[in-house]
Image: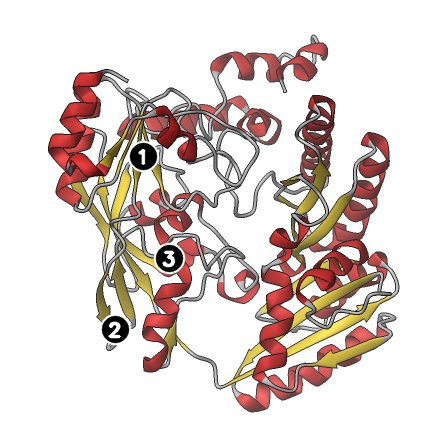
Amino acid sequence: MNPAVVEQLRKIAGRDAVLDRPEDLMLYEYDAGIRKSTPGAVVFPQTTNQVSQIMRLASSAQVPVVARGAGTGLSGGAISREGGIVVAFSRMNRILEIDVENQRAVVQPGVVNLQLSEHVSHLGLYFAPDPSSQKACTIGGNVAENSGGPHTLMYGVTVNHVTGVEVVMPSGEVVHFGGKAAESYGYDMTGFFVGSEGTIGITTAITVKLLRKPEKVATLLAIFETVDDAGQTVSAITAAGITPAALEMLDGWTLRTIEAYCHAGYPLDAGAVLLIELDGLRESVEEHAEAVQAVCLQQKAREVRRAKTEEERALLWKGRKTAFGALGRVSPSYYTQDGVVPRSKIPATLAHIGEVSKKYDLIIGNIFHAGDGNLHPLILFDIRFPDQLERALAASKDILEYCIAVGGSITGEHGVGMEKRDLMPVLFTQEDLDVMAGLRNAFNSENLLNPDKLLPTPRMCREIFGAARNPVLVQEGM
């Protein structure tokens, strides 16, 4: 990094708000994925004006900029590919306003997801999007990746709960999309911005919806002998006209690993379990809980347990939300993927993942949002052995290509980032990608914001779309 640029960053944000020593930058060369790339400098702004000045400096010096929240992302989205400036938002972590009457909150991007719900809990309100990393991930990062979580099935992903954003553009200009209103007219710029993975602008304030806490919550654990029976049950519950707040699935290997870690009460001899949550009015919840139990038993569940206390419910969810941490006890490294398939294709996709596990001689666990077909295969490997990393990457590509083949997608909530961008031409046509690039370029014409993310390079597109003439190019390009 040019020392003059670093010195200007210190003038903007303060001397203690800029890192440029190699030993400090190492902490920002990775996220929760498997890629690494060292930035040239890291800056910690505290105000929108400072972010604006940083963008003006970067634009003038033609230095790439990457916005970063808590670094819990799983697609390499918060990594600086060009040795540029990482703008870290850990110091912009204030809740700016709580509007109880309109059920809105205005927060800075560094606010931790769970902290917002805890802050408004005494008002009978909460923030619905709940990624598994919600104890650490930030709302700014959730907006960038359009994050989901277990309760996506009923409540939707982040974009369904954001009504306005304050954005700093590459030029340093500060603009506002949306606001507190429930509906907006004209182009939905807020919806366009959410999920753009930091390639359009940098958000410095976010207006979100707050929901009333439900009157009643019921949490069920359905236990199955086989993964296939559990997978079939997901479609059966939907076919019965019931939409749970959450419908999660864990296979036997994964639940045993979790149980050894946190003792959530999962059955060690099960082939799979479904963690099912229903919420709403008391009468409706009770009726649906009975109906769900009946469907599960019809679909060969050997038992359906219901949490009797809030402590039991919290323990079941602790198992689900600490699953990724539990894997650290059994494997030095693992690759978490994020594909989506139609619910009816879940059993076949799980069978294919089993075949992939054998093909590449790697353990692959399954824990995922079954209700909306959002799979999270966990590919275990030892990063100290390059051949294992190569096999893990090949297994991941195989799984995601299968998801596309059965009518699904390469991401449900983790984003594309750098890890899946080269699969975009498999999912989209060249015309689709041209439109996306045109939209990005309208706001980020010099590609200084999060370069080499989300959209593939022109070379990669040529290789993928030329596959019919030369299939070898696809294999080399991925």
- Residue 78: quadrant of the picture: top left
Marks 1/2: CA–CA distance: 29 Å
- Residue 442: quadrant of the picture: top left
Question: Pointer 3: what residue?
Answer: 112
Which sits earlier in the primary sequence, circle 1 or circle 2?
2
User: What amino acid does circle 3 point to?
Assistant: Val
Q: Position of residue 429 (x, y in %)?
A: 55, 26
Contact between labelled residues 3 and 1, with CB atoms less than 8 Å apart:
no
Q: Position of residue 24 (x, y in %)?
A: 36, 32
Q: Which mark is residue 177?
A: none
> Which sits in the foreground, 155 or 97?
97
Tell me the quarter of the image containing the N terminus.
top left
User: What amino acid does circle 2 point to?
Assistant: Asn
User: What amino acid does circle 1 point to?
Assistant: Ile
> Which sits in the foreground, 249 or 314?
314
Contact between labelled residues 2 and 1, with CB atoms less than 8 Å apart:
no
Q: Is residue 334 left or right of residue 364?
A: left
Report whether residue 192 is seen.
yes
- Residue 223: quadrant of the picture: bottom right
Q: Position of residue 387 (x, y in %)?
A: 73, 22
**257 is higher (above) or lower (below) than 440:** below
Looking at the rendered structure, the secondary structure element under dot 3 is: loop
Which sits earlier in the primary sequence, circle 1 or circle 3?
3
Q: Which mark is residue 102?
A: 2
Q: Nearer the viewer, mark 3 or mark 2?
A: 3
Marks 1/3: CA–CA distance: 22 Å
Q: How many marks?
A: 3
Q: Which mark is residue 200?
A: 1
